[in-house]
């Protein structure tokens, strides 16, 4: 892979880190090395032909937008657990209600779980998604979904009161371009929410290349609280909050990579689920002390901007 020259967020030089890993989820290719910006603490990976590292193995098999009719008891229990964990996550920052209901756009909406949450609170839900299966699942939950990207979205400027990037911005090679496009869609006084894996969290330092949220090479940008603060300044947005949160499933998936070295459905995965649940209480305690495995920003567009 080519060595990247400059940070895509602030333009400062990048330095090579010791963090590298193969594609453990889809192709097995690699390793891919992460470079880091000292100025804003953004990690970055330069990848050619990024689309080839997605496909059905990522969109349909891993995320399970629709359960198979013959899904076993354990798979159904896992699906129910994921849904319960998502509901708890949506009730906390950065997704807790940020104002009266309006129009919300979820960029990279997946199967529409977050949009369904906002719809239940009275919001009008809209999404952008590149996976046909995920877009269909989101539409089935009542969302209006554009199949494509921010670059070809169909809406007029200042159309939304809330725009969300929930674990999607890290997939976009040019994050500032995407964020500026999102800001154009925000109405004056509107809110931009970003949630992404926390590159500077203690879990990443301990687990190194086995830390599941690295997801190389699909995660081409690796954010930190400092990087999100830099993004806010570059965009000219008001910072309402920047912080970290914990993702319970990341512990299990990281343990799975330690056990199996790559994504391998079967008894190794179920063992990792069990170990992750057992270890989650001390992991959560460390997250609260040192910072969680995800970082977020809640940003606001000034009312007097047109």
Image (cartoon, helix red, strand yellow):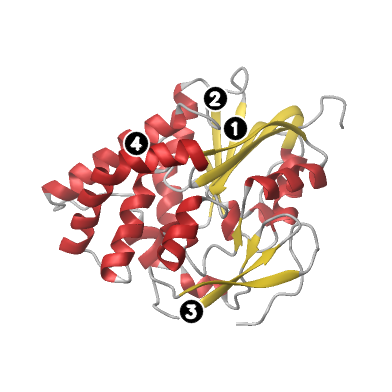
Q: Would you say the residues marked 2 and 1 are in contact, meaning their CB atoms lie under 8 Å apart?
A: yes
The one of 185 and 280 positioned closer to us in this rendering: 280
Q: Would you say the residues marked 4 and 2 are in contact, meaning their CB atoms lie under 8 Å apart?
A: no
| Label placed on residue 123 | 2
x, y percentage for residue 39? 76, 57
Residue 303 appears left or right of 250: right
Q: Residue furthest top?
A: 100
Quadrant of the image occupied by residue 26: bottom left
Q: Quadrant of the C terminus?
A: top right
Viewer-side label of 1, 4: 4
Q: Earlier in the sequence, mark 4 or mark 2?
A: 4
Q: Secondary structure at mark 2?
A: loop
Instruction: Say whether residue 39 is visible.
Output: yes
Q: Secondary structure at mark 1?
A: strand
Viewer-side label of 3, 1: 3
Q: Which residue is mark 1?
A: 104
Q: Which residue is mark 4?
A: 85
x, y percentage for residue 10? 79, 57
Q: Which residue is mark 3?
A: 31
Quadrant of the image occupied by residue 171: bottom right
| Label placed on residue 208 | none
Spatial distance from mark 3 to mark 1, Cα to Cα?
38 Å
Viewer-side label of 3, 4: 3
Q: Secondary structure at mark 4?
A: helix
Q: Earlier in the sequence, mark 2 or mark 1?
A: 1
């Amino acid at each position: 892979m080519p060595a990247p020259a400059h940070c895509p967020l602030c333009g400062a030089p990048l330095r090579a880190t010791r963090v590298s890993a193969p594609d453990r989820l889809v192709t097995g290719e690699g390793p891919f090395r992460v470079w880091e910006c000292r100025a804003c603490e953004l990690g970055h990976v330069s990848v050619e032909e990024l689309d080839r590292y997605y496909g059905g193995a990522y969109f349909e098999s891993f995320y399970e937008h629709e359960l198979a009719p013959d899904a076993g008891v354990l798979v159904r229990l896992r699906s129910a657990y994921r849904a319960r964990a998502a509901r708890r996550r949506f009730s906390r920052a950065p997704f807790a209600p940020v104002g009266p209901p309006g129009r919300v756009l979820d960029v990279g909406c997946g199967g529409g779980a977050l949009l369904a949450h906002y719809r239940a609170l009275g919001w009008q839900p809209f999404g952008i998604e590149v996976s046909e299966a995920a877009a269909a699942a989101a539409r089935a939950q009542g969302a209006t979904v554009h199949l494509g990207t921010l670059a070809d979205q169909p809406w007029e400027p200042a159309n939304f009161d809330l725009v969300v990037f929930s674990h999607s911005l890290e997939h976009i090679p040019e994050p500032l371009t995407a964020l500026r496009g999102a800001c154009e869609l925000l109405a004056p006084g509107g809110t931009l929410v970003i949630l992404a894996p926390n590159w500077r969290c203690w879990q990443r330092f301990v687990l190194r290349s086995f830390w599941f949220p690295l997801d190389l090479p699909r995660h081409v940008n690796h954010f930190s609280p400092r990087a999100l603060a830099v993004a806010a300044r570059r965009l000219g947005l008001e910072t309402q909050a920047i912080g970290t949160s914990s993702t319970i499933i990341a512990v299990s998936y990281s343990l799975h990579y330690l056990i199996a070295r790559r994504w391998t459905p079967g008894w190794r995965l179920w063992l990792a689920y069990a170990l992750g649940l057992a270890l989650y209480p001390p992991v959560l305690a460390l997250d609260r002390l040192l910072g969680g495995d995800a970082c977020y920003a809640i940003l606001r567009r000034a009312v007097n901007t047109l």
